[in-house]
């Protein structure tokens, strides 16, 4: 089964006899790796207790829109933002009608209005109610609105009827939901990403650095996390928030970055899980030979100051020499002969893949929100035209998962 690793699911439970199956559904979602928060309508609480669903989900159950205590913990808008998907199972005929018409008269309908993530509903009702014109019109409208329908299935119903309207089995619902993400490709894999610039101290107040924003590395961290990986960012000094569910180690200089990378990869090599290393950092190639312990003073009558620079360690080349070798992906930011330099780098640094971009184009690359890249691996290459960094990042992660 496609996994739900790192996925946050808001499970809405509405009033119907199939609400008892929500307990098993929570188990299946958690087994698949998801974190689950449950929202119950008033009617749902007539069929199953909040306490049961709280114990199974391991999180407080959200019951009412105007509950000050719950709002103080995680408000309804925050909850809508928290979810990677909203799943309503069972979805009663009444709830479906309210959802169709955009009601916001309880917590669950309000969440559906506020949510920007995909919404899935697993209807459960008597076969006559399911087939009714009013319900069928509602279902058609919801599908037009982009809401995903899971089931219902056919069979014996609690009322004694036989027909279409039973809620789909919890296992099937969990599987359909997992498949909808289409991104379990890096489940169980550890991903280490270096990002941003490094700063090489000249004296206590001055340094040599570059314009790298770290945006590409951070976008890759999110894409790898969404693909199910356990991700660590080793970040130089950047002004970016850490993506949710991503580990972060802050470093300053190239030497710090190498030390943090080596320490982390040493730890990861103790487990058998595969490791991917992605070097997006714009590591300073050289650093001042010595960093003055006191601020360097301007000396009168001496218009020149000479800095002696020495080469920094090549972090990615060191990673590619490790045994076992992580799947190693480099970046080549060039201003000319981009593909030639990239191909040279892939063999010189013993890389498994390189992502080449042309930083001479002012609209893309360093500091920009856009990029355009060519992904090169020993047997082929693929060009991704100008797009946002998150879109480029997903394409790179997808290509890595195909090459593993
Ligand atoms: O040789 P160049 O700096 O162009 O190579 C770029 C690639 O090598 C990037 O993936 C970058 O993160 C990595 N690199 C590194 N350590 C260095 C220099 C570059 O990891 N000292």
Image: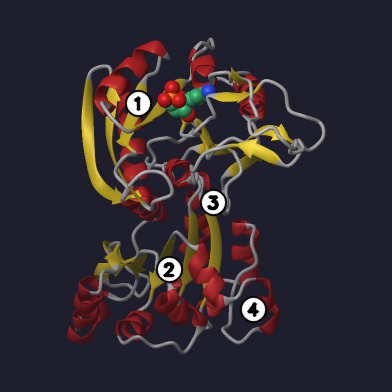
Of the numbered discs 4 and 1, the one sitting upstream in the chain is 4
| Residue at image coords 49%, 70% | 80
Q: Which mark is residue 243?
A: 3
Q: Position of residue 157 (x, y in %)?
A: 33, 69
Label 1 – label 3 distance at C-alpha: 24 Å
Residues under numbered marks 3 and 4 in contact, where contact means CB atoms less than 8 Å apart: no
Q: Position of residue 59 (x, y in %)?
A: 64, 61
Which residue is identified by label 1? 354
* Above-or-below relation of 400 to 393: above
Which residue is identified by label 4? 71
SS state under label 1: strand
Q: Position of residue 368 (x, y in %)?
A: 39, 51
| Residue at image coords 35%, 85% | 102
Label 4 – label 1 distance at C-alpha: 47 Å
| Residue at image coords 55%, 20% | 272
- Judging depth in this view, the residue of 290 and 283 nearest the camera is 290
Which residue is identified by label 2? 18
């Amino acid at each position: 089964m496609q996994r739900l690793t790192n996925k946050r699911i808001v499970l809405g439970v509405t009033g119907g006899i199939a609400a008892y199956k929500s307990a098993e559904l929570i188990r299946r979602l958690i087994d698949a790796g998801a974190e689950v928060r449950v929202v119950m309508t008033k009617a749902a609480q007539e069929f199953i207790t909040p306490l049961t669903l709280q114990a199974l989900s391991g999180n407080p159950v959200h019951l009412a829109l105007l509950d000050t205590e719950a709002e103080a913990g995680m408000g309804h808008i925050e909850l809508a933002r928290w979810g990677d998907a909203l799943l309503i199972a069972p979805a009663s005929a009444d709830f479906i009608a309210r959802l169709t018409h955009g009601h916001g008269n309880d917590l669950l309908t309000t969440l559906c209005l506020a949510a920007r993530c995909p919404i899935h509903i697993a209807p459960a009702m008597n076969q006559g109610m399911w087939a009714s014109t009013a319900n069928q019109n509602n279902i058609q409208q919801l599908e037009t609105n982009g809401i995903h329908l899971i089931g219902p299935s056919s069979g014996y119903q609690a009322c004694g009827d036989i027909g279409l309207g039973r809620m789909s089995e919890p296992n099937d619902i969990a599987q359909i939901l997992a498949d909808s993400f289409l991104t379990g490709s890096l489940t169980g894999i550890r991903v280490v990403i270096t990002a941003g610039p490094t700063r090489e101290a000249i004296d206590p107040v001055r340094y040599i650095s570059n314009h790298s924003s770290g945006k590409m590395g951070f976008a890759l961290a999110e894409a790898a996390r969404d693909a199910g990986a356990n991700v660590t960012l080793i970040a130089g000094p950047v002004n970016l928030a850490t993506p949710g569910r991503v580990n972060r180690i802050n470093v300053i200089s190239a030497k710090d970055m190498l030390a943090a990378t080596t320490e982390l990869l040493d730890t990861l090599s103790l487990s058998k899980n595969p490791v991917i290393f992605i070097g997006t950092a714009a590591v300073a190639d050289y650093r001042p030979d010595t960093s003055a312990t006191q601020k360097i003073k301007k000396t009168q009558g001496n218009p020149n100051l000479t800095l002696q620079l020495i080469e920094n360690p090549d972090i990615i080349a060191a990673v590619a020499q490790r045994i076992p070798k992580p799947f190693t992906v480099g970046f080549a930011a060039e201003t000319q002969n981009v593909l030639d330099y990239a191909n040279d780098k892939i063999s010189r640094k013993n890389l498994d893949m390189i992502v080449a971009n042309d930083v001479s184009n002012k609209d893309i690359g360093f500091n920009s929100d856009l990029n355009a890249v060519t992904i090169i691996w020993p047997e082929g290459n693929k060009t991704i035209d100008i797009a946002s960094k998150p879109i480029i990042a997903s394409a790179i992660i997808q290509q890595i998962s195909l090459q593993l």
